[in-house]
Amino acid sequence: MSQRMEGKVAIVTGAGKGIGRGIALALAREGARVVVDDIEFQSAMNVADEIRKSGRQALASGADVSNSEQVKRMVDETLCQFGQIDILVNNAGTGKVIPFLEISETLWDSLTSINLKSVFLCSQEAGRQMLKQKRGKIVNIASIAGHEALPGTAAYSPAKAGVLQLTRVLAVEWAACNINVNAVSPGFTLTPHTESTMKEHPELIQNYVSRIPSRRPATVEDVANAVLFLCSSDSDDIFGQEIVVDGGTSILHSGYVRTEV
């Protein structure tokens, strides 16, 4: 079986669980040496251990990727351990559904820092090394929320829209340096968190899933496979694009604003 990432070094943020963990494990299976970053350091160590047990190299990091000093330290540790950075997957993020007038300044700052500022900081720091190498792959995990105007997402959705626009700007700025910057936007995805929600509110989740044209949520593997493509040489002429992994949801609702009467 071919291993598309053999000899590559990848940093995956928010990789201690869920989609980030799936991406980190998939990159390792394809031959990459992986830096597993998560602000919950024990979770990062657990995933790094999984990778090592599979026979691949891994480094655990507990950096808060919304903090510039900690991001720099993570990149420095990566270079010290592995000597290069070929892939950066900006996956760290969080969301909260809350009415607009209830969003505090503190919550706004927190959500935009984790979802958008972290992409800026990590891309800038890892990008310095990629520019020296004159090669690299950056994949930003956005969301279909970056396109849709849904009630209660006035902080999360603008941040994810910002991730998509930053992806495009970096793509054109660094294309001549052989650095591909692209995005993957998941829709409703089965993770340990969403699975627990399904158990608590099965009727709510079933109603949501019934609106997905494919009639199933995305899996972590679905998202990871899109990321693998964008990290591989198969995507060498793809710059500033977005792969939407949502079972057709955004296509079904494109051009329509859904309102409740």
Image (cartoon, helix red, strand yellow):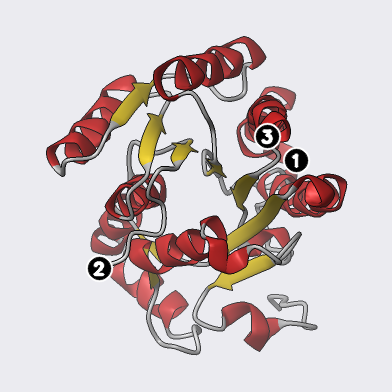
Mark 3 lies on a secondary structure that is helix
Amino acid on which the number 2 mark rests in the picture = Met
Give residue 168's quadrant in the image.
bottom right
How many angstroms separate mark 2 from mark 1 (CA)? 53 Å
Mark 2 lies on a secondary structure that is loop
User: In front here: 234 or 26?
Assistant: 234
Q: Which mark is drawn over residue 178?
A: none
Q: Which mark is drawn over residue 1?
A: 2
How many angstroms separate mark 2 from mark 3 (CA)? 31 Å
Image quadrant containing the N terminus: bottom left
Asked if one can make out residue 142 in the rendered structure from this viewpoint, the answer is yes
Q: Earlier in the sequence, mark 1 or mark 3?
A: 1
Q: According to the image, label 3 marks what residue?
A: 123
Tell whether 191 sits left or right of 159.
left
Give residue 54's quadrant in the image.
top left
Where is residue 145 drawn, in percent x and y? 65, 60
Amino acid on which the number 1 mark rests in the picture = Leu
Amino acid on which the number 3 mark rests in the picture = Ser
